[in-house]
Structures are given as structure tokens and as C-alpha cells.
Image (spheres, grey):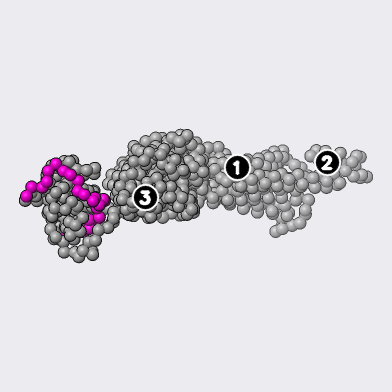
């Protein structure tokens, strides 16, 4: 402004557009700050606008293609008078002189480089290049998750913030990130003389304790003010989940929740690292494994929140027991956690490359899980899953797995706890029924059919259990996987097969002359059968505990055991009643009456 007036407003209004071009050694992104220089009576400099830019590589196949241009935004302030500087611009001077600028202006003497920066009038119309305000943002970490807060709460929150900053509520917006304790405050327009950058700077300068009082909530930390760039454009060479600075208060650009679960994975990444947030409805640990669909041999980041302290590390899992989960793998940084209203949130940063590489250009197989304790412990069968995640685009999908464990449980229960029980009961309490089925006594026919069905389901269930362990590359019947449940199951499986073969090869029965071998076999066969069923009923409970199943399944098993015992008592009473009524009678061929069997003597008395 060489017209002698004391303001730069007229000069600014006369400049319709100016194009700036420079050459960088490599593509990158950052912030370019523009300053306006005033000459005349009151020479000086003031901050015109910071502009977020993304330098694009010019294709070698078509060097004439220039990077996409962006209009410069409006000044962050509109001074009524140019700041005073040490000296005015000399006539014909093309470089900025040494100045003593106002707050926010450069303190060094920039030197223009004609080879790197040029200025020329743009051909775009003034309407196209009309100044627009660049939003600025500040991130607050709160003490509670407000993502489900009511509109009235948000209105009150903004009213208190506007009063504290001295601006209008229409000048900014607040977004509570779902499932987190992050509040993103975005300043969009100037208000009461404060530009978005000035309002953001004022907020970032407030202490957490001050804001806690002013906003009537708990504020843990406040980030620095920064230009709000939104979601990076994929055309700039960055992915939708890209965030250059993965600082402690950095936002998460992408998230994914496996179908039908309360587990949520959120993340942002740059060229070398990824920041992750794991959340689940639990008071215990949460974890995520990378690059595999199997737990055993994988590497996973596991963490929990203990007394407000984040205990997050990467582990190598060589088995399924806690003794097989050992710390090792990539080093983690920026550990943080919260545990609010039964929901655990864990944050950390890890390198994209390392023991297991996380790709940002395609799908990565991942396993997720959560447990109920603030330490390494077994997770429930429902507290785990396999997903495919594209950490670049932010998309994910749930991998449907064959539930070997459920099929194993159903088959083993039907075989050993249902059909074996039916077979034993028919042999114990139906012998008095002389009905014939297929030329066999009714009790024997039912006994054979029930035992054969039980053997079928037992063999299938055993195979499914074996396949489940093999699928996870784990060791069979070891402390790593099955503990007492697997070993007891193996013993019952072997004994049951021997029992079935023994029934087929039983000694011949002579009603008039019971041989010693027949007596030994009969006692052993009955005792072994009842023992198998009793231990099978107990082993089901051990299996439910191993799978950390819902309590409902335990209650159902208890009910089944109670029904079986009540049935035994009922049939025993009925059988003894008949025995007592028929075993003792007067006969001219016998000197004395026949006594009842010992098991029925108590009833008969």
C-alpha cells in the first residue's frame, strides 16, 4: 500500500488473486503461512493466512501436469492499522526487510528465491477465488464418554465453552467421538473479533483444570491448536486413514466393529507407524493379533487398565494357556487407557513393520479377543473372533468360522450324557418287561440301540475336538489347551470303546449255572458303565469352565444331573417295590420264604 493510508484493507480488497508456485525436492505435506506487507506511512507485516498444502509429485510421463491448486483463505485477522516495523520498504525492494513484527509474524528475514517461488496473476475469476475461512481444531480428552449424550447436554457444553472463550456458539462445533472420551472442537467462523485460529489458540492455552471448572466436566488434556484438514484425499497419495502426526491427542480416522459384537477397533496411520484403540464391554483386558487367523504362533497387542495405569504390551503366543503367552515382538509407544462404566479402552502406537507387518494397501488378517481380568487370562468362546481389515481404506469384514467347539460339545453331550444314560437305565430297570422287539427282550434292544447311538456321537464329537485343536496349531491333550477336561475326555473315550467291545464279547449267560467269569464281567460292565456316565457329566462342567461359557449352560447341566439322579431314585423305588412284593412268598416246595435282594431290604423293612 503506497497510497499513504494507514490501513491495508483497500490494498487487500484490490488483490483479486495471486498464484504461488514452488518446487520441492520431494512430495510432502505441511502448512504454508502467508503474510501481508504494508508500506507507506506505517510499514509493517501482519499474518494473512496459514494454508494446509499437499505437494504432489509431477508425473514424469506428463511434466506439464501441475499439482492441484487451492485458494488462499481469508486473513486470520483484519487489522485496522498496519504494525509498525523498523523500516519501510525501500523503493524497488523485492525482498522482505528485517522487521520487528507483531505476535504471529516471522522474526527472521525471509529471502525470496526466484528459482523456487514465483508470483503471477491467476486467471480464475474473483468469485472462484473468493476468500474462505480455514477451520481450526482443538482436541479435549474428557473423563467420560459423551458420545451418546443428548442434544441438550451438547448445547449446554457449547454454551459454557463459548462463554469461557468470549465467542458465539455459532462460531464452532463439538463432536464427541463414538465410544471414546475425545471431544473435537472445530472453529469455523470468526466471532467477536477472534478468527478460528485465534479462538483455537485461546482454547489450547487453557489448562485442563480451568476447563474442567468452566465446562463442568473432567478434562484430562488439551491439544495444541491445528488446522482442521478433515479426511485426506486419496488422490494426494494418502489413504483415508492417514494422519501425519500420531501424537497422544491425535484423532482416529477409521474404525471397525466385528459383526454382532461390542468390540471396536479404531486407528490412524502414517508412513511408518499406526495408532490403535481397542475397546470392549469388559473390566479386563483387550487384545488384537495381526497377520493371522489363528491364535497360536501369532503376535498380539494386549492391554488392560489397572488403577488408571495402561499396561499394554505385544506378546508372542505359542499356545492357549497363559504360560504360553510371552512378551515379545514390536515395541509399543504412547500407552493410554480408560475403564468407564464397564467398558475398557486401550490406546497405543506400534510400527507398521516388524515381527508382523500391518499393511495399509490391502486386507490384513486379524484376531481379536477380550477377557474379564486385569491380567493375562482365558477368554470366553464368545469373546474372540477373526476379521479382515484394510487399514488404508478403513473397511473390514468378519470371517465366519466353523465352530468346532460348539459342535464338539453338542455331540459329546448327546453321546455320553444322554444316550449312554438311556442305555444304562433300560438295562437296570426294564428287565421285568418281557416284551420282545426283533426277537430280543425290550430292555436289551433299547440298551443296544442307545449305546450304539451314544458311541456314534462320542466318536464324532471326539473328532471335532481334535480338529479344533489342530486348526489352531496347538498341542493335543496338553496343559496348553485341554488341561483336565481334555485328558479326562481322552480317558473316557478309550474306556467307552473298551466297554462297547466288552459288551459285544460278553461271556455266555447260563441262567441255571452263572459262571465266575460271567459274574466278574457282569459286575465290571455295570460298574464301568455307571462310572463313565458320572465322569462324563463332570467333564461337561470342566469343558464349560474351560470355554468360559455363560452361567446358563452350567445351570442346565446341573438340572440334567438332578433329573438323572431323581430318575435313578424313582426307578430304584419302583423296582424294589416289585421285588419286595414278589420275592417273599409261601411255597409248599420251599421250607422258608425267599428274602428280598439286599438293595431292597431297606425298602422292604
Mark 2, residues whose alpha carbon is within 10 Å: few (<14), some, or many (≥20)? few
Earlier sequence position, callout 2 versus callout 3: 3
Mark 3, residues whose alpha carbon is within 10 Å: few (<14), some, or many (≥20)? some
Q: Main secondary structure of the magenta part?
A: loop
In the picture, the disc for residue 541 is 1
Place of residue 338 in the rendered image (x, y in percent of width and height, measured from the top left): 45, 40
Q: Which residues are magenta?
A: 66-91
Q: Element at badge 2?
A: helix
Question: Position of 366 compared to 102: left or right?
Answer: right
Residue underneath mark 2: 603
Q: Is residue 68 magenta?
A: yes
Q: Is residue 7 or residue 63 the one in the foreground? A: 7
Mark 1, residues whose alpha carbon is within 10 Å: few (<14), some, or many (≥20)? some
Residue at (70% x, 47% y) in the render: 563
**Eyeballing the image, is 463 above or below 333?**
below
Residue underneath mark 3: 167
Residue mark closest to the camera, 3 vs 1: 3
> How many numbered callouts?
3
Residue at (6% x, 50% y) in the render: 91
Q: CA distance from mark 3 to mark 1?
A: 64 Å
Q: Is residue 109 or residue 264 the one in the foreground? A: 109
Earlier sequence position, callout 3 versus callout 1: 3
Q: Element at badge 3?
A: loop
Question: Position of 10 compared to 390: left or right?
Answer: left
Place of residue 201 in the rendered image (x, y in percent of width and height, measured from the top left): 31, 44
Place of residue 80 in the rendered image (x, y in percent of width and height, measured from the top left): 23, 51
Amino acid at each position: 500500500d503506497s497510497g499513504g493510508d494507514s490501513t491495508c484493507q483497500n490494498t487487500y480488497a484490490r488483490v483479486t488473486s495471486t498464484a504461488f508456485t514452488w518446487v520441492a525436492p520431494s512430495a510432502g505435506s505441511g502448512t504454508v503461512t502467508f503474510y501481508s506487507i504494508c508500506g507507506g506511512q506505517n510499514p509493517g507485516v501482519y499474518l494473512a493466512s496459514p494454508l494446509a498444502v499437499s505437494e504432489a509429485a509431477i508425473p514424469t510421463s506428463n511434466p506439464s501436469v501441475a499439482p492441484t491448486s487451492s485458494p488462499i483463505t481469508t486473513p486470520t485477522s483484519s487489522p485496522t492499522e498496519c504494525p509498525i516495523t523498523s523500516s519501510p520498504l525501500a523503493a524497488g525492494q523485492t525482498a522482505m526487510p528485517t522487521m520487528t513484527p507483531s505476535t504471529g509474524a516471522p522474526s527472521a528475514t525471509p529471502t525470496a528465491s526466484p528459482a523456487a517461488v514465483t508470483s503471477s496473476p491467476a486467471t480464475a475469476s474473483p468469485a472462484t477465488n473468493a476468500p474462505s475461512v480455514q477451520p481450526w481444531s482443538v482436541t479435549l480428552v474428557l473423563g467420560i464418554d459423551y458420545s451418546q449424550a443428548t442434544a441438550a447436554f451438547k448445547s449446554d457444553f457449547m454454551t459454557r465453552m463459548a462463554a469461557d472463550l468470549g465467542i458465539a456458539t455459532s462460531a464452532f462445533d463439538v463432536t464427541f467421538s463414538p465410544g471414546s472420551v475425545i471431544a473435537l472442537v472445530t472453529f469455523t467462523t470468526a466471532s467477536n473479533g477472534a478468527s478460528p485460529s485465534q479462538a483455537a489458540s485461546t482454547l489450547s492455552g487453557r489448562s485442563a483444570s480451568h476447563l474442567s471448572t468452566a465446562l463442568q466436566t473432567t478434562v484430562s488434556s488439551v491439544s495444541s491448536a491445528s488446522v482442521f484438514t478433515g479426511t485426506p484425499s486419496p488422490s494426494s497419495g494418502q489413504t483415508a486413514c492417514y494422519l501425519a502426526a500420531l501424537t497422544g491427542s491425535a484423532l482416529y480416522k477409521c474404525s471397525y466393529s466385528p459383526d454382532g459384537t461390542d468390540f471396536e477397533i479404531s486407528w490412524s496411520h502414517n508412513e511408518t507407524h499406526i495408532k490403535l484403540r481397542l475397546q470392549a464391554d469388559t473390566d479386563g483386558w483387550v487384545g488384537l493379533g495381526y497377520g493371522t487367523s489363528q491364535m497360536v504362533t501369532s503376535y498380539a497387542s494386549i492391554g488392560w487398565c489397572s488403577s488408571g495405569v495402561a499396561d499394554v504390551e505385544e506378546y508372542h503366543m505359542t499356545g492357549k494357556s497363559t504360560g504360553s503367552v510371552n512378551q515379545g515382538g514390536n515395541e509399543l509407544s504412547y500407552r493410554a487407557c480408560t475403564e468407564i462404566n464397564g467398558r475398557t479402552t486401550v490406546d497405543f502406537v506400534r510400527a507398521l513393520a516388524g515381527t508382523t507387518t500391518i499393511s495399509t494397501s490391502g486386507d490384513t488378517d486379524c484376531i481379536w479377543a477380550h477377557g474379564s481380568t486385569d491380567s493375562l487370562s482365558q477368554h470366553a468362546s464368545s469373546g474372540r473372533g477373526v476379521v479382515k481389515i484394510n487399514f488404508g481404506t478403513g473397511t473390514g469384514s468378519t470371517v465366519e468360522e466353523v465352530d468346532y467347539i460348539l459342535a464338539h460339545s453338542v455331540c459329546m453331550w448327546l453321546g455320553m450324557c444322554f444316550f449312554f444314560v438311556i442305555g444304562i437305565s433300560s438295562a437296570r430297570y426294564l428287565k421285568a418287561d418281557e416284551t420282545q422287539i426283533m426277537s430280543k427282550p425290550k430292555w436289551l434292544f433299547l440298551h443296544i440301540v442307545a449305546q450304539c447311538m451314544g458311541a456314534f456321537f462320542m466318536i464324532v464329537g471326539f473328532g471335532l475336538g481334535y480338529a479344533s485343536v489342530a486348526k489352531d496349531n496347538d498341542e493335543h491333550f496338553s496343559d496348553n489347551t485341554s488341561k483336565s477336561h481334555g485328558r479326562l475326555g481322552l480317558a473316557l473315550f478309550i474306556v467307552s470303546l473298551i466297554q462297547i467291545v466288552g459288551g459285544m464279547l460278553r461271556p455266555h449267560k447260563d441262567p441255571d449255572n452263572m459262571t465266575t467269569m460271567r459274574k466278574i464281567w457282569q459286575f465290571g460292565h455295570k460298574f464301568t458303565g455307571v462310572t463313565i456316565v458320572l465322569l462324563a457329566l463332570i467333564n461337561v462342567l470342566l469343558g464349560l469352565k474351560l470355554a468360559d461359557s455363560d452361567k446358563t449352560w452350567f445351570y442346565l447341566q446341573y438340572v440334567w444331573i438332578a433329573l438323572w439322579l431323581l430318575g435313578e431314585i424313582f426307578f430304584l423305588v419302583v423296582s424294589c417295590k416289585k421285588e419286595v412284593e414278589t420275592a417273599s412268598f409261601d411255597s409248599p416246595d420251599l421250607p422258608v420264604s425267599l428274602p428280598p435282594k439286599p438293595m431292597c431290604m431297606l425298602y422292604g423293612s
